[in-house]
Image (spheres, grey):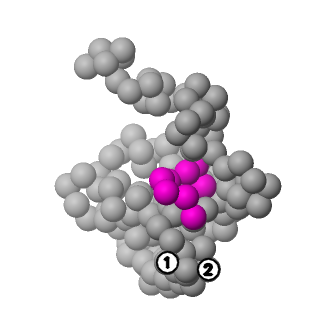
């Protein structure tokens, strides 16, 4: 596939640019889509979800629950393992480490689901900000869970 055949968000897989910059650029170009929140309260929630998945430990615990045992599992990708080992200061992901971390991962992810279901979505809404369509806040809030099922 030629570079120009790919969707614009995937042109630069090794890009240093944040996906948030892309969201704001898309919002500027297509304002009717409503990707970004407009009220101060909703902007505050969206800012919370920018950092919570990583700083709150959601991502680290989601990684513990990723299906590493499959043919396409993350432990089969040596380039990925090397990259993560360099990023984490020399600790390499192994099957034993992944399996040992799963009970803690399950406990923490259950707590996150409980938080979402009893607060942000507790009134029956489909989307965190109560919108008709997902916003950047929804994407920022749930991307670690998508990683769990890759």
Instruction: Examine the image and state in which quarter residue 31 appears.
Output: top right
Task: Find out whether residue 104 is within the magenta segment.
Answer: no
The answer to whether residue 35 is left or right of residue 67 is right
Q: Residue 132: within the magenta?
A: yes
Locate the N terminus and report the quarter of the image it occupies.
top left
Instruction: Name the residue at 58% across, 25% down.
Output: 29
Picture coordinates of residue 22 (x, y %)? 58, 32
Secondary structure, mark 2, is helix
Task: Please state the horizontal and vertical placement of residue 67, each as a whole percent of the image.
Answer: 31, 65
Q: Which secondary structure type mostly characterizes the magenta part of the structure?
A: loop
Question: Whole-percent x and y of residue 79?
Answer: 39, 40
| Label 1 element class | loop
Can residue 79 be seen by looking at this rendering? Answer: yes
- The residue that label 2 is drawn on is 119
Per the image, the residue denoted by label 1 is: 124
Q: Which residues are magenta?
A: 130-137
Say few, some or many: other residues with alpha carbon within 10 Å of mark 1 (under 14 / 14 to 19 / 20 or more).
few
Res 94 seen here: no
Q: Left or right: where does residue 112 sit relative to residue 70?
A: right
At 35% from the left and 24% from the top, the residue drawn is: 6
What residue appears at the point 47 percent right and 67 percent down from the top-left corner? 126
Residue 16: percent from the left, percent from the top? 61, 30
């Amino acid at each position: 596939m030629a570079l120009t055949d790919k969707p614009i968000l995937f042109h630069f897989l090794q890009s240093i640019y944040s996906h948030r910059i892309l969201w704001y650029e898309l919002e500027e170009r297509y304002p009717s889509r409503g990707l970004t929140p407009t009220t101060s309260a909703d902007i505050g929630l969206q800012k919370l979800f920018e950092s919570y998945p990583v700083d709150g430990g959601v991502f680290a615990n989601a990684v513990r629950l990723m299906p590493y045992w499959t043919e396409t599992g993350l432990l089969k990708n040596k380039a990925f393992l090397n990259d993560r080992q360099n990023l984490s200061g020399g600790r390499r992901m192994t099957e034993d480490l992944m399996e040992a971390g799963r009970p803690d991962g399950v406990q923490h992810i259950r707590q996150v689901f409980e938080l979402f279901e009893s607060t942000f979505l507790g009134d029956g809404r489909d989307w965190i900000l109560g919108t008709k369509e997902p916003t950047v806040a929804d994407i920022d809030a749930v991307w670690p869970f998508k990683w769990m099922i890759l």
